[in-house]
Image (cartoon, grey):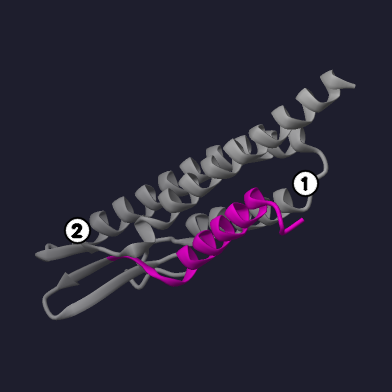
């Protein structure tokens, strides 16, 4: 299972998605106060990061599940397509939480600075790794089909 390159790609994709839970996505600096949005929590009062947290957890679970269906390559490819959609959903949930944080700080009439963290890049890295895994799975599937034609 783990000797296949696509399994390693999927494992690293799960690792990067899991890191998205722990690292900072965006930091707001306002009048000496620092507010932070991570995959697990938001320190901006009233901003919800729960949808982002749930989509990240579901994403990690789906990626790990796709590793264990390695015997059914077409099903694994479908799973990866679903995970791609889920990764887009992660970015949408981040956008909503970020927008909510900006609105709350805007209502407080505070001047604030925004600094994006590495968390924003994690879904993009995962998506690239998922793409590499799908290419490797397709290559395996083509190899199996060509061997079936020779029989």
Q: Nearer the viewer, mark 1 or mark 2?
A: 1
Image: 17 above or below 29: above
Q: Earlier in the sequence, mark 1 or mark 2?
A: 1
The residue nearer to you, when weighing 131 against 62, is 131
Image coordinates of residue 13 in percent, x first then y, are 55, 55
Is residue 42 shown left or right of residue 144? Answer: left
| Region in magenta | 1-26
Q: Position of residue 80 (x, y in %)?
A: 63, 40
- At 68% across and 39% down in the image, what residue appears? 79
- Give the farthest residue toward the right: 151
Give the prevailing secondary structure in the magenta stretch. helix
Q: Is residue 33 shown above or below 135?
A: below
Residue 110 % position (x, y): 12, 66
Which quadrant: the C terminus?
Answer: top right
Q: Please, what secondary structure does the residue beneath circle 2 have? A: helix
Of the pair 59 and 41, the residue shown nearer to us = 59
**Residue farthest to the front, as pictured:** 150
Give how far across and how far down residue 95 sits, in percent: 35, 48
Q: Which mark is residue 107?
A: 2
Is residue 54 inside the magenta stretch? no
Quadrant in the rendering for residue 86: top right
The label on residue 70 is: 1
Look at the image and tell me in which quarter the N terminus lies. Answer: bottom right
Task: Please say whether residue 45 is visible from this viewpoint.
Answer: no
Is 24 drawn above or below residue 84 in the view shown?
below
Badge 1 crowding class, 10 Å Cα cut-off, few under 14, some 14 to 19, many 20 or more, is some
């Amino acid at each position: 299972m783990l000797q296949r390159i696509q399994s390693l790609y999927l494992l690293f994709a799960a690792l990067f998605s899991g890191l998205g839970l722990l690292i900072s996505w965006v930091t707001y600096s306002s009048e000496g106060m620092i507010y932070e949005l991570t995959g697990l929590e938001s320190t901006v009062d009233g901003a919800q990061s729960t949808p982002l947290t749930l989509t990240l957890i579901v994403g990690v679970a789906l990626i790990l599940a796709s590793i264990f269906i390695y015997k059914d390559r077409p099903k694994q490819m479908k799973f990866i397509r679903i995970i791609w959609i889920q990764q887009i959903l992660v970015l949408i949930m981040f956008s909503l939480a970020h927008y909510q944080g900006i609105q709350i700080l805007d209502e407080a009439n505070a001047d604030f600075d925004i600094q994006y963290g590495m968390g924003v890049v994690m879904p993009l890295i995962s998506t690239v790794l998922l793409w590499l895994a799908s290419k490797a799975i397709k290559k395996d599937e083509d190899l199996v089909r060509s061997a079936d034609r020779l029989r």
